[in-house]
Image: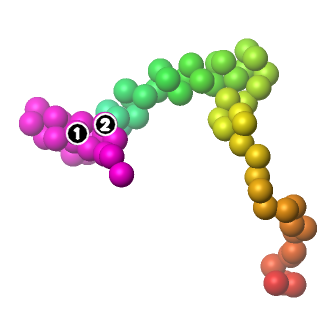
Amino acid sequence: MPANVDLYSGFVYRALNIPVDIATPLLATARLSGWCAHRLEEIITGRRLMRPAYNGVQPYLEYVPLQKR
């Protein structure tokens, strides 16, 4: 499995002496504009963008309360 960019970002952050406590918020901040763009597009078009062609293959299962499981 190929590594995603976050693996290499960690090395860069360490080389730049960025504190470990800030690494996760920094990664999220870098992605925030993309997340906002996706959400705005969902609102404008009225359609969900995540997995638009996904169809489940498992048959529908009725909910069974915990006490009856």
Q: Which residue is mark 2?
A: 5
* 5 sits left or right of 56 in the view: left
Q: Give the number of the disc on residue 63.
A: none
Please, what is the three-letter code of the amino acid marked with disc 2?
A: Val
**Image location of residue 2, percent across then percent down:** 33, 46
Instruction: Tell whether label 1 touches label 2 (CB within 8 Å).
Output: yes
Q: Which residues are magenta?
A: 1-24
Disc 1 designates what residue? 8
Of the 4 image quadrants, the one containing the C terminus is: bottom right
The amino acid on which the numbered mark 1 sits, given as a three-letter code, is Tyr
Q: Residue at (16%, 41%) from the top-left corner?
A: 11
Res. 18 in view: no
Q: Is residue 43 above or below residue 67?
A: above
In the rendered image, the residue lying farthest to the bottom is 68
Instruction: Point out residue 1 in the picture as x, y percentages from the top left corner.
Output: 36, 51
Point out residue 7 in the picture as x, y percentages from the top left corner: 26, 44
Q: Secondary structure at mark 2?
A: helix
Picture coordinates of residue 61, whole percent (x, y): 86, 66
Q: Which one is nearer the viewer's eye here, 3 or 15?
A: 3
Give the alpha-carbon distance from disc 2 to disc 1, as whole Å: 5 Å
User: Coloring scheme of the render?
Assistant: rainbow
- The verdict on residue 19 being magenta is yes
